[in-house]
Image (cartoon, grey):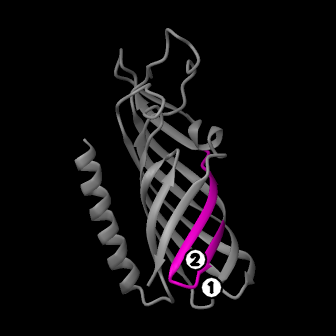
Amino acid sequence: MYRTILKLLSAAASLLLCCATSRGQERPLVGLYQSPHGVGVTAFFPTPDASEMDILTLRTDFYGLLAGRTNEVGGCISYTHDYSLLRAEGPDFRLQLHVGAGGLAGFGHDFEKGFFSATERSLVHNRGWIIAPQGNFGMRVDFRRHFSLDLSFSVAPGVFLRTDKATGTLLVSFYKNGTYHAYYPQINLMYRF
């Protein structure tokens, strides 16, 4: 399973690198995404004046995996168009606060009660499809040696589609993980080309 995830992340990094170099924009960034949500790859495509950027992320969905409630890994792709709120420069760095909106689509588990219960620790429901608008707020620091660090938080109130295990019927519900875990930090360590 982990080799498959590694192969998918490598292929996604290659694809994002090709996209970054073909767009012709000023200094695209490609790097690693790390969060309690999951791990993956991220690409930032800033405009020439650095006042806006497109952020594309392909990541795994770890809900339930780290707590030992399931052994199934999900996956997500997200896109946001962020605007620069504040920029400050120092001798060796540039700081930028950014905020934006976009969307998220994926396949994984949603929030379930019972984490602190001894008898209902495992996830009960099937994995399902996630479709959600997404809001993003973050802070990016560009260092002199082509490395950047981005810390952000995202909220994704959306729809969760899954089938019932017993009857096989399609169930539609509010995607709780998108709002309940909005406080999870997302860290991107990137290289500027």
Local packing at callout 1 (Cα closer than 10 Å; few below 14, some 14-19, many 20+) is some
**49 lies above or below 138:** below
Name the one closer to the observer, 84 or 118. Answer: 118
Whole-angstrom CA distance, mark 2 to mark 1, is 7 Å
Label 1 near label 2: C-beta < 8 Å?
yes
Taking the spot 60% from the left edge, 78% from the top edge, the residue there is 142
Taking the spot 57% from the left edge, 55% from the top edge, the residue there is 186
Verify whether residue 143 appears in magenta: yes
The residue to which callout 1 is attached is 50
Residue 68 location, x and y as percent? 43, 27
Local packing at callout 2 (Cα closer than 10 Å; few below 14, some 14-19, many 20+) is many
Write down the quadrant of residue 17 in the picture: bottom left
Which range is magenta?
Answer: 139-157
**157 lies above or below 11:** above
Taking the spot 55% from the left edge, 74% from the top edge, the residue there is 148
**17 lies above or below 39:** below
**145 lies above or below 9:** below
The residue to which callout 2 is attached is 53
Verify whether residue 162 appears in magenta: no
Q: Quadrant of the N terminus?
A: top left
Residue 147 location, x and y as percent? 51, 77
Name the one closer to the observer, 53 or 86. Answer: 86
